[in-house]
Image (cartoon, rainbow, N blue to C red):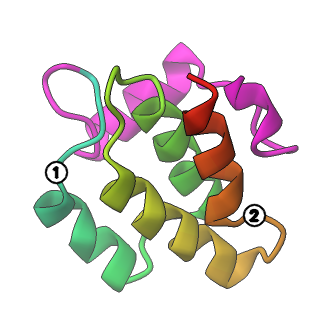
Amino acid sequence: MTKDIFPDVKEVTQGDRTALDLMGLLNSNKYVVSWGTLAPWLTNRKLTTEQAKLLVLIELERVFPRFDLLHRLVSYISYFEKEINISTIISLLTKK
């Protein structure tokens, strides 16, 4: 399901998870941190689009993904890359 969202990022490898964890972007459960922790990364444009895409894929692994967090990450990505939009994410979530 999630492999269809981003043509250039198909899956999250263990190396990707480790790198994001070392950056402080994953919590102790290995899911994306809260919005309060993530916000400065987006505001200061410290994330690459690839890192943001990986965070979207990790968030979609949750039983109940946080739509507000997904929306903010997708908005961040779409600022740089226009082909992804929130409707892609919504259609995938409704298929669950």
In the figure, is residue 66 to the left or right of 87?
left
> Residue 47, labelled with which disc?
none
In the figure, is residue 93 to the left or right of 31?
right
| Residue drawn at (64%, 27%) of the image | 95
Coordinates of residue 47 in the picture (x, y in percent): 47, 65
64 or 35, nearer to the observer: 64
| Residue drawn at (67%, 44%) of the image | 91
| Residue drawn at (56%, 22%) of the image | 96
Coordinates of residue 59 in the picture (x, y in percent): 41, 36
3 or 44, nearer to the observer: 3
Mark 2 → mark 1, Cα distance in angstroms: 23 Å
* Residue for badge 2: 84
Query: In the structure shown, which secondary structural element does the residue marked by tag 2 occupy?
Result: loop
Count residues near mark 2 (Cα–Cα under 10 Å), then give few for <14, some for 14-19, many for 20+: some
Q: Quadrant of the rendered structure where residue 21 is?
A: top left
2 or 39, nearer to the observer: 2
40 or 3, nearer to the observer: 3
Q: Is residue 94 above or below residue 70?
A: above
Q: Tell which tag, 2 or 1, sits nearer the viewer.
A: 2
Residue lying farthest top? 14
Count residues near mark 1 (Cα–Cα under 10 Å), then give few for <14, some for 14-19, many for 20+: few
Residue lying farthest front? 94
**Magenta part of the protein: which range?**
1-29
| Residue drawn at (16%, 51%) of the image | 34
* Residue for badge 1: 34
Badge 1 amino acid: Ser
In the figure, is residue 88 to the left or right of 96?
right
Q: Quadrant of the rendered structure where residue 29 is?
A: top left
Q: Is residue 89 above or below residue 96?
A: below
Coordinates of residue 24 in the picture (x, y in percent): 22, 45
Q: Is residue 95 above or below residue 13?
A: below
Instruction: Find out whether residue 4 is within the magenta segment.
Output: yes
